[in-house]
Image (cartoon, helix red, strand yellow):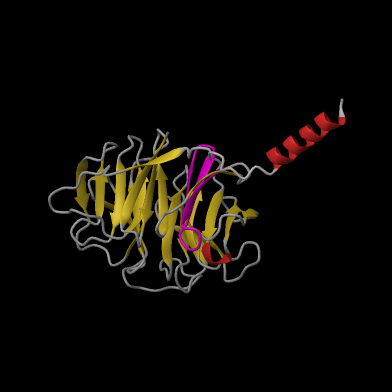
Amino acid sequence: MKRAAVAALVLLAVALTHDARPRAAAPPHYQLVEHWVHFPPEVSTWGMVTGVDVDAHDNVFVFHRNDRMPIMEFDRRGNFVRAWGQGLFKTTHFLRVDREGSVWITDRGDMRAIKFDQRGKILLTLGKKGVLGDNTSTDAFNGMADLAVARNGDIFVADGEGPNTRVAKFSKSGAFLKWWGGKGSAPGQFDMPHSIAVDSKDRVYVADRSNNRIQIFDRDGTYLNEWTHFGTPWGISIRGDRVFIVDGTANNCLYVANLKDGAIIEKIEGLSNPTAVAIDSAGALYVAEVNGTNLKKFVRR
């Protein structure tokens, strides 16, 4: 090949390597659904949304700081179904729907967890209204944050947004079984265990917020592993082979990751203090924003 031709090829290769022209980014896998919810006449906007979950029929249950309708239910199209809980809570926090369809809430102000049926009838209460306990307490809390329910009905409470730094385990009937944790950063210790979830194998995942990690345990509290690449985890939910984690502090984002190893698949940015996330059977995401006073819905493109 002639010297001139070789030189031309070299220049072309350099130009391609240093091409500064912007390239099209891969489109995001999720898109925001605007105005997805239809409020009843009594409520026109969200309060500070702290909890959200869906049931087996993809009905959406929302816990927000609104005195008239703190717990609201909508169908998958955003149509209002019912509300309850007026005057019952001091400081709304997380909401979970268990496998039987019961609706659980945590009240961080009165330090209680309450189990309802889907019409608002109280079925079970953990904790005593306004009574504070320590890490060793069997019937009181001082940091009531979130809870998760295992397949057999065992209840795991993240008691950590306050002086307490533990996970407390109860039977299906509400009998105290054990606790684990304590203040610190060593494996198995906590610094604000803020959210909790259980997978299909009854492994317990704890959003250890101020330690900037997710800790993983077996159902008896034996430490298994931890993930430290999700920023400051505020809320965690699991569906199938995916784990969904919201960082409500520095990154203000939602991570979608493989449950097997925590590898990040997707990241949704631009959120406003997200604290909880729920996933329906079609893969739609519902993100509760506290300071954003919003419940955002994202669907796959």
Residue 48 in percent (x, y) is at: 30, 60
Image coordinates of residue 98 in percent, x first then y, are 39, 44
Asked if one can make out residue 170 in the rendered structure from this viewpoint, the answer is no
Q: Determine the image quadrant of residue 213.
A: bottom right
Residue 246 lies within the magenta run? yes
Based on the displayed image, in which of its 4 quarters is residue 51 positioned?
A: bottom left
Main SS of residues in magenta: strand
Q: Is residue 206 shown above or below 143? A: above
Residue range of the region highlighted in magenta in the rendering:
235-258
At 55% from the left edge and 68% from the top edge, which residue is drawn? 191
In the image, residue 294 lies at what x, y percent?
Answer: 31, 54
**Residue pictured at 32% horizontal, 48% vertical:** 103
Which residue is outermost to the top?
1
At x 50% / y 70%, what residue is drawn? 135
User: Does 2 sit left or right of 109 as displayed?
Assistant: right
Q: Residue furthest left?
A: 41
Quadrant that contains the C terminus: top left
Q: Where is residue 209? Give x, y as percent.
A: 52, 63
Residue 13 or 184: which is nearer the viewer? 13
**Quadrant in the picture for the N terminus:** top right
Examine the structure image and report whether residue 119 is included in the region drawn in magenta: no
Left or right: 161 as drawn, with respect to 179: left
Q: Quadrant of residue 189?
A: bottom right
Task: Report the label total.
Answer: 0
